[in-house]
Image (cartoon, rainbow, N blue to C red):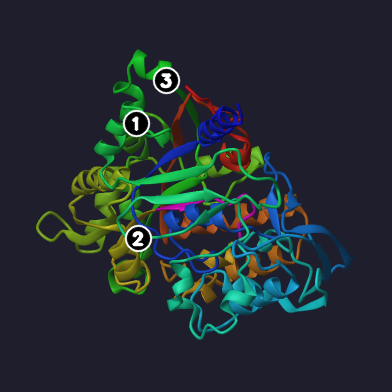
Amino acid sequence: MKTILLIFCFFSLLGASTNLTLPLSSSPLRLNPILGSDIVSRTIDQWIFDSLFIFSADGKKLVPSLAKSYFFKNKTTLIVKLKKDILWQNNDKFTAKDVLFTYKQLINPNNFTPLSDEFKNNISYLKILSPYKILIKYKHPYFRALAMWNVGILPFEVLKNEKNLMTAKFNKHPIGTGPYILKKLQTSKDLVLYANKNYFKKEPNISTITYKFLPNHNTKFLMLKQGKIDLAKLTALQATRQISKKFLKKFNIFESPDFTYTNLTFNLSLKKFKNLKIRQAINLAINKKQLIKIVFLGHAQICLSPFVIKNPKYLAKLKLMQKSQNLKKSRKILKSLGFDKAHPFRFTIITQSLNKNLALSAQVLQYQLSLVNILVKIRILPWEAFINNIINTKHFECILLDWGKPLLPNPSVIFSANADKLGGYNLARYHNKKIDKLIKQENITNSLEKIDLINYKITRILQNNLPYIYLYTPNIILAISKKIQNIKPSFTGIFYNERMWKIKQN
């Protein structure tokens, strides 16, 4: 009888093990939350690492995560109490030393991270008051005093003797406090995450997350239809024309505007783009509505701003600033600069292969610009080559790239003159004293209304000066297996409560 009971318990435990299968378009470059600049690395990082604060599901406020509580002693002094009994994935205890160590790495000039300027420019010092209590002294009142700590914390004991964080083995063998553990990372291979049984917020219901390495989009869609993937993004073409009633019996479709946008970025350090009239001529030649219709079959909107602008009055004014396609005016500007059919203006658009919509967008733009005698060459690079050879070096004429729209952005990361440096994200190499002044004003305000106004003013400057041409904000279309339960869509998406998801057993 005991033997039968043991066998029953054994198979019950096996049955309780569940797996979520997701697609992986490319391999992560670095699994380190302060260094990982590519979207794939950041996606994996979110399962492994935790931050002091996270955004609530509705996106309206920041709530403690590794932090237990906090209060402002005055306008520039933040006291944070940390949760006790949190374990790193190697069973070391999480303490204030880890937060101090992470801060020191963020401001270390040897670490090339786009996050460094925010910490250097706004924090005077961080001090440990006790093993589970820290004091953060800001240089001035700062609107992102909490939001800047929505970054993964690193383990002090694991990395304290590491001489070069940029090349550390840790970046391939990460140890975090997060809900999932990565045991092995291999380039161009499947990636498996295991539930952290000691996770302080409660062990996830799903035992493992398997990322299938599927760089080919057609293969990914085929495996999705076969039920070998549980959740994946759909292209507009797939969602509109390539899914059947049989597919819809197995999958739910979730669609909402994505927190991303796509733009053309001009390298303003090059002579050919320094003249604003050239950028104006390019802008007037582009038909954004046609672009959206061809690439997304209508499942996108014209991008009005790189920020999440909330005030409808500001949005209405930005909409009025949009220039409709005017080929006659574009040709006239080009002719005044000495360019015509016999002497066309030429440049190269470089983009990456990970997002197929970018390649198609480049082709549409190539055609539209040819109508005004602008000849465009297109280069499409693998993701790793694009990051290492183009983004990191800033060796390009023009790039077509998609960017994230954070809920509470830090404009200095992209638009400050100080971000025009190695590791910085001012890829246009655009310097504007008015924008730098507005960023300084934003840094010292805690009013969300004022922040919205400042971001609107920055957008107006960008729209008038055109270091970038903002094209579209796509909808995110997800196919989600009906066997996944407890998914609750929110303003911030669906992944905020992944730990609570359950896989329905067949």
For badge 1, the amino acid type reads: Leu
Residue visible at 13% across and 61% down?
343
Name the residue carrying label 2: 186
Instruction: Determine the residue located farthest toward the front in the rendered image.
Output: 1
Mark 3 or mark 1, which has the lower sequence index?
1
Residue 339 in picture, x, y percent from top left: 19, 60
**Magenta region, residue range:** 402-410
Identify whether 362 is placed above or below 34: above
Q: Observer-nearest residue: 144 or 345?
A: 144
Q: Residue at x 49, y 29 (%)?
A: 255
From this viewpoint, is residue 56 visible? Answer: yes
Task: Look at label 2 and name its amino acid.
Answer: Gln
Q: Which of marks 3 and 2 is nearer the N terminus?
A: 2
Question: How packed is label 1: few (under 14 Cα within 10 Å), some, or many (20 or more)?
Answer: many
Whether 439 is drawn above or below 27: the answer is: below
State whether the magenta stretch is mostly helix, strand or loop.
loop
Give the residue displayed 54% in from the left and 76% down from the top.
418
Quarter of the rendering containing residue 357:
top left
Residue 491 appears left or right of 208: right
Q: Nearer the viewer, residue 343 or 132?
A: 132
- x and y, in percent, of residue 118 in the image: 63, 71
**Numbered disc 1: secondary structure:** helix
**In the image, which disc is placed on residue 224?**
1
Which amino acid is tagged 3? Lys
User: In which quarter of the view is residue 104 placed?
Assistant: bottom right
Is residue 154 located in the magenta-colored stretch of the structure?
no
Callout 3 touching callout 2 (CB < 8 Å): no
Towards the viewer: 27 or 206: 206
What residue would you read off at disc 3? Answer: 250
